[in-house]
Amino acid sequence: MSNVPFTIMGTDYVQLIVGNAKQAAHYYQTQFGFDPVAYQGLETGDREKASYVLVQNKIRLVLTTPYLASSDLNEHLRLHGDGVKDVAFWVDDAEAAWKYTTEQGATSVREPFVISDDDGEVKLASIHTYGDTIHTFVQRDNYKGLFLPGFIPFETRVQTKPVGLNFIDHFVGNQPENQMTKIAEWYERVFGFTRFWTVDDKDISTEYSALRSIVVTNDNQRIKMPINRPAVGLKKSQIQEFVEYYSGPGVQHIAFDTNDIVQTVTQLRDNGVVFLDVPAEYYDELPKRVPEVEENIDDLGQLGILVDKDEFGYMLQIFTMPVQDRPTLFYEIIQRKGAKGFGKGNFKALFESIERAQARRGNL
Ligand code: FE2
């Protein structure tokens, strides 16, 4: 056991800074089945920004847009486009989390503070991580409101149809050349995270591009975070493409857990979500590669769902195309049937698909 004096119970919320949160909220509702439950903006007294909170089971997204040219959030938009600003951690003690992490060398964004309303109080504090990304510590044991004090219920006549997304399985940070190990060691020192699973470019390479990855996790493994960097290939790595369009390091993808990936992806595709395509040959080899698959191979092939296995079991996964015009943030849908990995066995097939998309963008 580590001697870290606080516990992370999971991801509390993920905040994205976007160009038009009102429209993005509609997109996440109608395409991904998130329920818009809460709002903060001019009508609630926030003069700087509008924020929409969208929920599906244990996943909480916050979409935020600045109103005025004077807001610092505009710089986030200019540099990164729509993207993740804050991966907030649900903790038992926000003060202890901030104190310990800053003592270990993290840079503070905001010292611990308390906000309250009729539903109780929440203690918050934030630190910087890679790039312009931050982690906010959220201590909400004395709060029974919708999200945070200051938010009001969001009203819409649009019906939400959930697609079965349960919780965040993992989220991935892309780093420029030479930064991956440093960032992994930062999480080990500052958070007491440990290394979970590592791949090198022997595992993940195609003819053209490659990545390397270190996965770090906390004690209870509620937080799992692969950290990627580009590896040298014949052509441009997808990680390098991300770093160029994101103006540096940032969150590349977030993986949502589901209990029934065939059902979830069927609904997502019907809603208009576009996924990476998978070569037909992939499904010819699949029964040999993962003989224990219970799902119908034709269903998996039609939906483009990938399968991988490790010593613990198997898992099914699929990746969306980027969800904004910049080729940056995308999502993964994952169903674990025992396997603990992140799809190492799929990387080759997957990267060939990513590279076809990169080539269409003229970035290979
Ligand atoms: Fe992933």
Image (cartoon, rainbow, N blue to C red):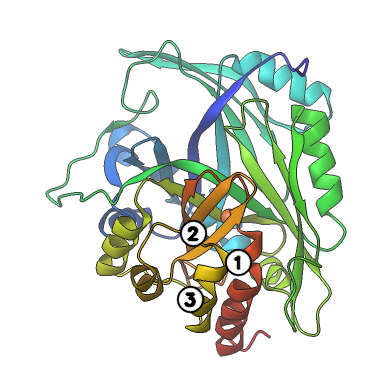
State how far apart marks 2 and 3 are (Cα): 14 Å
Which type of secondary structure does the marked residue at label 1 adopt? Answer: helix
Q: Is the CB of the residue bearing disc 1 within 8 angstroms of ligand 1?
A: no
* Amino acid marked by disc 2: Gln
Q: What is the x, y in percent for residue 276?
A: 48, 74
User: Which of marks 3 and 2 precedes in the sequence?
Assistant: 3
Q: What is the x, y in percent for residue 154?
A: 23, 39
Q: What is the x, y in percent for residue 179?
A: 84, 54
Left or right of 32: which side holds 124? right
- Image quarter where the N terminus lies is top right
Which image quarter has ligand 1? Answer: bottom right
Left or right of 58: which side holds 331? right
Q: Circle 3 is placed at which residue position?
A: 283
| Quadrant in which residue 107 is drawn | top right
Which type of secondary structure does the marked residue at label 3 adopt? Answer: helix
Residue 214 vs 141, above or below: the answer is: below
State how far apart marks 1 and 3 are (Cα): 12 Å
User: Which of marks 1 and 2 precedes in the sequence?
Assistant: 2
Which type of secondary structure does the marked residue at label 2 adopt? Answer: strand
Mark 2 or mark 3: which is in front?
3
Q: Is residue 27 visible?
A: no
Q: How many marks?
A: 3
| Quadrant in which residue 166 is drawn | top left
Left or right of 353: which side holds 214? right
* Amino acid marked by disc 1: Asn
* Amino acid marked by disc 3: Tyr
Disc number at residue 317? Answer: 2
Q: Circle 1 is placed at which residue position?
A: 346
Neighbourhood count class around disc 2 (C-alpha, 10 Å): few under 14, some 14–19, many 20 upward: many
